[in-house]
Amino acid sequence: MALQAASLVSSGFVVPKEAKSNASFKDSSLFGVSLSDHLKADFSSSAPRSKRESNQRVGAVRAQTMATASPAVNRAVPEGKKTLRKGSVVITGASSGLGLATAKALAETGKWHVIMACRDFLKAERAAKSAGIAKENYTIMHLDLASLDSVRQFVDNFRRSGRPLDVLVCNAAVYLPTAKDPTFTAEGFELSVGTNHLGHFLLSRLLLDDLNKSDYPSKRLIIVGSITGNTNTLAGNVPPKANLGDLRGLAGGLNGLNSSSMIDGGEFDGAKAYKDSKVCNMLTMQEFHRRFHEETGIAFASLYPGCIATTGLFREHIPLFRLLFPPFQKYITKGFVSEDEAGKRLAQVKKGEPHIKIFSYHAIYIICYFLALGRERSKLGKIRCILELEQGLCFI
Ligand code: NDP
Ligand code: PMR
């Protein structure tokens, strides 16, 4: 169960004493294991390129911690004070669905410049145009989360652009429910976990320094989670259920050769791999909050936007599913939400008690779900109030 995995995983976290005492980003390991030598190469000073490349084939995740440079804590502008400049927000996967709708909602306020971090430049350009986002409000930059080199390249390019980073929204994802066999990222990790979790983990970890330097009053890092990873909800109990087990597949490198392609070490299952990746996304924010919020003032959040049953996420599903899923969510579960509404919700995630505690998140979801039954779900004022009260930032 996801919850079991969560408790197992949190007990595996180790925060080195120095990280607590000198307020520096010392420990880059996640879930008690470091992600890989690929990631390590970034966090540890100046490992020679050739060594890094030879490490890439290894792909093993080792039980160890890693050192990073220690950025200075930056709180140049006291919280609550306004800066005059536009906010600068990076959104991954902004070429369609929720990411595009969020980019549009933020750009329309006139207060944000959106960096659309996308793998398909032309598609992103067309999408921005057809959504009517004004040219001066967005920039497209290439990012393929299925390649850790591309993630590093993106970070370099972003830094070279000279823009500040005030908010990072990790939104992109792939869902491969009908795949019989696993496919892999450039570095050989199973594609769903590699893209949705590992790519975003590296991106977040690298950009933490940039967020920390921002003088914006509310710096934020948001990852899009999913109810389907939460096994104490009805949706999370639809098989296959998320389960990270004892992380043996992750520890083995998720390469499907000398280790399983699944985090828990089991047989490949595309739908489960997606749900596992979403559990990792939510846990990442929980752990980032624990490690870094106090020293940086960055708000770390995870959000379930509602069931946006019409997006491209379901492109790999069978046609019958794609036909029946939207009316099923609209009229039966009433979990349906339009892309526009979901985009507005994500755009509104704001500072508060800065992360979702996934345990209470389940309970809150259930309460809100019943409160919302029979009401117009696009006007979630009351629910929003409850959630803001309880969590500061979570919208269902
Ligand atoms: P979409 O498929 O419309 O959007 C996913 C985006 O991710 C696309 O822009 C896609 O790019 C991009 N992407 C995929 N792989 C990569 C990659 N390797 N590198 C960079 N970008 C990539 O789906 P949604 O809008 O529905 O999904 C957005 C988020 O919402 C996901 O995190 C999903 O898990 C989450 N979510 C969705 C729900 C839903 O009901 N739809 C419910 C709960 C959560 P491209 O356009 O090039 O394919
Ligand atoms: Mg689910 C309250 C009921 C509820 C909600 C909110 C969702 C959301 N789903 C619910 C219930 C059910 N679903 C039930 C009872 C069934 C069995 C008929 C069911 C089935 C189902 C399938 C086969 N649902 C799905 C699938 C998918 O392939 C989707 C998935 O798991 O993608 C990972 C999905 C979803 N249901 C949701 C949401 C939000 C999804 C998409 C999850 C995501 O994009 O992260």
Image: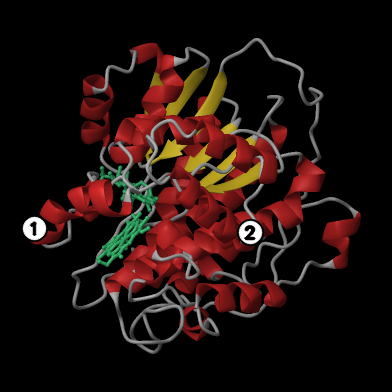
Tag 2 and tag 1, C-beta contact below 8 Å:
no
Q: Is residue 92 shown to the viewer in this render? A: yes
User: Nearer the N terminus, badge 2 or badge 1?
Assistant: 1
Q: Residue at x 38, y 63 (%)?
A: 235
Q: Is residue 193 shown to the viewer in this render? A: no
- Residue 176 is situated, as x and y percent measured from the top left of the image, at 25, 64
Residue 267 falls in image quadrant: bottom left
Residue furthest to the right: 21
Within 10 Å of disc 1 (Cα), the crowding (few <14, some 14-19, many 20+) is few
Q: Residue at x 89, y 53 (%)?
A: 22
Residue furthest to the bottom: 258
- Is residue 263 rendered to the left or right of residue 302? left
Amino acid under disc 1: Pro
Q: Residue at x 55, y 62 (%)?
A: 39
Relative to 128, say whether 302 is above or below: below
Whole-number angstrom distance, CA of label 2 to CA of label 1: 36 Å
Relative to 35, say whether 324 is above or below: above
What residue would you read off at disc 2?
360
